[in-house]
Image (spheres, helix red, strand yellow):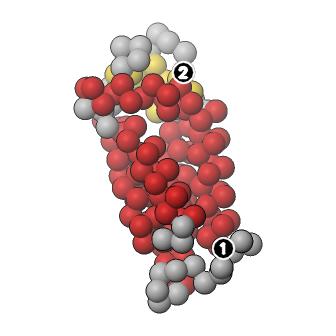
Protein backbone atom coordinates (compact mmCIF):
# COMPACT_ATOMS: atom_id res chain seq x y z
CA UNK A 1 0.00 0.00 0.00
CA UNK A 2 1.48 3.39 -0.95
CA UNK A 3 2.44 5.74 1.86
CA UNK A 4 -0.14 8.32 0.79
CA UNK A 5 -3.01 5.85 1.10
CA UNK A 6 -1.77 4.42 4.39
CA UNK A 7 -1.27 7.89 5.89
CA UNK A 8 -4.64 9.09 4.68
CA UNK A 9 -6.31 5.97 6.09
CA UNK A 10 -4.58 6.40 9.45
CA UNK A 11 -5.55 10.08 9.61
CA UNK A 12 -9.19 9.24 8.90
CA UNK A 13 -9.13 6.42 11.47
CA UNK A 14 -7.69 8.74 14.12
CA UNK A 15 -10.32 11.36 13.31
CA UNK A 16 -13.10 8.76 13.64
CA UNK A 17 -11.69 7.53 16.95
CA UNK A 18 -11.54 11.11 18.25
CA UNK A 19 -15.29 11.42 17.71
CA UNK A 20 -15.96 8.58 20.16
CA UNK A 21 -13.61 9.81 22.89
CA UNK A 22 -14.17 12.61 25.41
CA UNK A 23 -12.86 15.83 23.92
CA UNK A 24 -13.68 18.11 26.83
CA UNK A 25 -13.97 17.66 30.56
CA UNK A 26 -16.31 20.21 32.11
CA UNK A 27 -16.93 21.36 35.63
CA UNK A 28 -20.31 20.07 36.92
CA UNK A 29 -21.14 18.26 33.66
CA UNK A 30 -20.18 14.90 32.14
CA UNK A 31 -17.40 14.87 29.53
CA UNK A 32 -18.28 15.96 26.00
CA UNK A 33 -17.54 13.40 23.28
CA UNK A 34 -15.91 14.43 20.05
CA UNK A 35 -18.99 13.82 17.93
CA UNK A 36 -20.96 16.26 20.11
CA UNK A 37 -18.21 18.83 19.74
CA UNK A 38 -18.27 18.33 15.97
CA UNK A 39 -22.05 18.82 15.84
CA UNK A 40 -22.32 21.79 18.21
CA UNK A 41 -18.84 23.31 18.34
CA UNK A 42 -19.65 25.80 15.63
CA UNK A 43 -21.61 27.68 18.30
CA UNK A 44 -18.23 28.79 19.57
CA UNK A 45 -17.80 30.93 16.46
CA UNK A 46 -20.34 33.32 17.97
CA UNK A 47 -17.91 34.08 20.79
CA UNK A 48 -14.76 33.91 18.63
CA UNK A 49 -13.75 30.39 19.69
CA UNK A 50 -12.59 29.35 16.25
CA UNK A 51 -10.87 26.00 16.93
CA UNK A 52 -13.88 24.14 15.48
CA UNK A 53 -12.90 25.50 12.05
CA UNK A 54 -10.11 22.92 12.01
CA UNK A 55 -12.78 20.37 11.01
CA UNK A 56 -13.65 21.84 7.60
CA UNK A 57 -9.95 22.50 6.97
CA UNK A 58 -9.22 18.82 7.68
CA UNK A 59 -12.02 17.78 5.31
CA UNK A 60 -10.53 20.01 2.60
CA UNK A 61 -7.07 18.53 3.29
CA UNK A 62 -8.47 15.00 2.90
CA UNK A 63 -10.05 15.95 -0.43
CA UNK A 64 -6.76 17.50 -1.57
CA UNK A 65 -4.88 14.35 -0.58
CA UNK A 66 -7.34 12.15 -2.45
CA UNK A 67 -6.92 14.36 -5.52
CA UNK A 68 -3.12 13.94 -5.38
CA UNK A 69 -2.49 17.54 -4.30
CA UNK A 70 0.06 16.97 -1.50
CA UNK A 71 1.19 20.60 -1.19
CA UNK A 72 -2.36 21.80 -0.73
CA UNK A 73 -3.16 18.88 1.59
CA UNK A 74 -0.10 19.72 3.69
CA UNK A 75 -1.02 23.40 3.94
CA UNK A 76 -4.62 22.67 4.90
CA UNK A 77 -3.70 19.97 7.43
CA UNK A 78 -1.05 22.24 8.98
CA UNK A 79 -3.60 25.07 9.18
CA UNK A 80 -6.10 22.69 10.80
CA UNK A 81 -3.46 21.76 13.38
CA UNK A 82 -2.66 25.41 14.08
CA UNK A 83 -6.29 26.39 14.44
CA UNK A 84 -6.96 23.30 16.55
CA UNK A 85 -4.32 24.50 19.00
CA UNK A 86 -6.60 27.43 19.78
CA UNK A 87 -8.63 24.92 21.81
CA UNK A 88 -6.16 25.58 24.61
CA UNK A 89 -7.48 29.14 24.85
CA UNK A 90 -11.14 28.13 25.28
CA UNK A 91 -12.40 28.44 28.83
CA UNK A 92 -16.13 27.81 28.39
CA UNK A 93 -18.14 25.25 26.46
CA UNK A 94 -20.74 27.42 24.81
CA UNK A 95 -23.30 24.64 24.35
CA UNK A 96 -23.63 24.23 28.14
CA UNK A 97 -22.22 27.55 29.30
CA UNK A 98 -19.89 25.41 31.39
CA UNK A 99 -16.28 25.88 32.45
CA UNK A 100 -13.75 23.68 30.63
CA UNK A 101 -11.52 21.98 33.17
CA UNK A 102 -9.27 20.24 30.64
CA UNK A 103 -9.10 18.84 27.15
CA UNK A 104 -9.77 15.12 26.85
CA UNK A 105 -8.11 12.25 25.00
CA UNK A 106 -10.34 12.88 21.99
CA UNK A 107 -8.75 16.29 21.52
CA UNK A 108 -5.26 14.81 21.34
CA UNK A 109 -6.33 12.06 18.93
CA UNK A 110 -8.10 14.72 16.82
CA UNK A 111 -4.89 16.74 16.66
CA UNK A 112 -2.89 13.61 15.82
CA UNK A 113 -5.11 13.10 12.76
CA UNK A 114 -4.05 16.52 11.47
CA UNK A 115 -0.38 15.80 12.10
CA UNK A 116 -0.51 12.41 10.39
CA UNK A 117 -2.14 13.90 7.30
CA UNK A 118 0.31 16.82 7.23
CA UNK A 119 3.33 14.52 7.61
CA UNK A 120 2.03 12.11 4.99
CA UNK A 121 1.41 14.96 2.56
CA UNK A 122 4.84 16.43 3.18
CA UNK A 123 6.56 13.09 2.64
CA UNK A 124 4.45 12.41 -0.47
CA UNK A 125 5.37 15.82 -1.82
CA UNK A 126 9.05 15.10 -1.39
CA UNK A 127 8.93 11.72 -3.12
CA UNK A 128 8.66 13.25 -6.58
CA UNK A 129 9.89 16.56 -8.00
CA UNK A 130 6.42 17.50 -9.22
CA UNK A 131 4.85 16.94 -5.81
CA UNK A 132 2.50 14.37 -7.32
CA UNK A 133 2.18 10.93 -5.80
CA UNK A 134 4.27 8.52 -7.94
CA UNK A 135 1.60 5.81 -7.79
CA UNK A 136 -1.43 6.08 -10.05
CA UNK A 137 -4.86 6.27 -8.40
CA UNK A 138 -6.53 2.92 -7.80
Q: Is residue 44 visible?
A: yes
Q: Earlier in the sequence, mark 2 or mark 1?
A: 2
Above or below for 56 versus 75? above
Q: Residues within 10 Å of mark 2 (few under 14, many from 20)?
A: some
Q: Can you tell which mark lies on residue 137?
A: 1
Indicate the quadrant containing the C terminus: top left, top right, bottom left or bottom right: bottom right
Above or below for 4 versus 22? below
Judged left or right of residue 34, residue 91 is left
Q: Secondary structure at mark 2?
A: loop
Residue at (36, 25) in percent of width and height: 43
Give the residue furthest to the right. Answer: 1
Residue at (62, 64) in percent of width and height: 7
Q: Can you tell which mark lies on residue 122?
A: none
Q: Residues within 10 Å of mark 1 (few under 14, many from 20)?
A: few
Total marks in image: 2
Q: Is residue 105 visible?
A: no
Above or below for 82 versus 49? below
Q: Which residue is mark 2?
A: 31
Real-space Cα separation, disc 2 to disc 1, in angstroms: 41 Å
Above or below for 106 versus 29? below
Give coordinates of residue 75: x percent, y percent: 38, 64
Amino acid sequence: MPLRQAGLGLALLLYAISLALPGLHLRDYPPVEGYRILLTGWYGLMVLQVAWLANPLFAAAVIAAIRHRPRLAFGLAAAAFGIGLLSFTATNWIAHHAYIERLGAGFYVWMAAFLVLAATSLISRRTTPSGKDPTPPA
